[in-house]
Amino acid sequence: MYVSAVDAGKLIGRSTRTIHRWIEQGKLQARHHGSNQLLILLADVEALATDEPEVVTPLSLLHAQAETAAELRARIDELLISTRQLSQQVTTQQTRIEHLEIVTRHEYEAHSILQKLLSVRPSALDSIDATTLREQRAEVGRLTRQLSVLEKRGLPLGSQTLSTFCKWHSGEHATVHPSTMKGILEAASRVSEMIAIYERPTASTYTHEWWVTPEQQHNMILFWQSHGKPFEPCPECPHTDIRVVEVTQESSVPA
C-alpha cells in the first residue's frame, strides 16, 4: 500500500517538509505518480517512524502535564473522601471501645465477687457484701443497655435502615418500598457503594440489615431521583443527628 507525502506526515506526526527531506536524504524510497505527486510505501514510513526519535514539543508536554494534574486531583479528592469516612469510623469505634471497656471492667469485678461467694462455706456468706454484688451486676446491665442500636452495630450517628429511609422520604403513602430499592441497587451493582449491610449472626430470619449512613444518604437521594422515584425531605433532613429507633423485624430488610 502506498501513501502520499502529505498522508505519510499525518500518519507519523511529521511535517510534509520532513518527509521530503527524508526522501532527499535517501531514508525513504518514493516513486512519482503523475506530474506532481510522490508515493511512498506505507511499510517504509512505519519502519522509519519507529527508528526516528519521538518529537517532543512544548505543547505536547503541556498536554501531558495537564492530564497528569487532572489525574492527581481526582485521586486526591478520592483520598480526602476516604480519609473523612475513616475518621468518622475511628471516632465511632473509639466511643464503642470505651463503653465496652467499662462494661468489661464492671463485669470482671462482679465475676470476682461471685467466685468468692461460691468458694466460701455457707456459714461465711454473711461476710460477703451481697449489696455490692447486686450493684455491680446492675451496673453491667445498665451500661450494656446504654449502647445504642448504632453503637452495637458500629455505625455512625445519623444512619437509618433502608426501610426507615424509604418510609420517611417517599411521601405520605410511602410509595417507594425498600424491596423495590433493593432490586434497583442490585441491578445497578451499587449495593456496596450505597448500603452498609449489618449481618446478624444469631438471627434465624432477617439475617441481614440494610443501613444507609449519613455519607451514603446524599448519593442515595441522587440515585433515587435519577430513577424517577419521588423523594420528599423529612423534618429531620439532613440526617446527621437523628433519634435512633430500635430495629424490629419489620424495619429490617432481609437478604
Image (cartoon, helix red, strand yellow):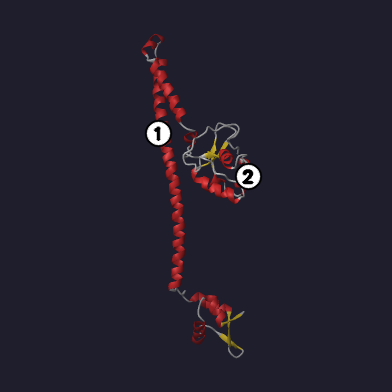
Indicate whether 40 appears above or below 101.
below
| Label 1 element class | helix
Mark 2 and mark 1 in contact? Answer it, CB < 8 Å: no
Q: Is residue 189 left or right of residue 239?
A: right
**Residue 54 vs residue 48, the one in the foreground:** 54
Vertical comparison of 32 with 110: above or below: below
The amino acid on which the numbered mark 1 sits, given as a three-letter code, is Glu
Residue shown at 47% from the left, 32% from the top? 148
Q: Residue under circle 1?
A: 98
For the N terminus, which image quadrant? bottom right
User: Can I make out residue 114 in this image?
Assistant: no
Label 2: element kind: helix
* Sequence-first tag of 2 and 1: 1
Q: Position of residue 73 (x, y in %)?
A: 44, 58
Towards the viewer: 104 or 228: 228
Residue pushed farthest bottom?
A: 35
- Asked whether residue 123 appears in the rendered view, the answer is yes
From mark 2 to mark 1, how far is it between C-alphas? 38 Å
Identify the image quadrant of residue 35. bottom right
**Residue that sits furthest to the top in the current view:** 123
Instruction: Compare residues 122 and 160 and report the one nearer the observer.
Output: 160
Q: Which amino acid does label 2 sit on?
A: Gly
The image shows residue 58, relative to residue 88, as above or below, that is: below
What label does residue 11 carry, if any? none
Check disc 2 and report the residue beneath it: 183
Image point (40%, 29%), residue name: 102
| Residue beneath the point at 40% across and 33% down | 98
Tag 2: Cα neighbours inside 10 Å, few (<14), some, or many (≥20)? few
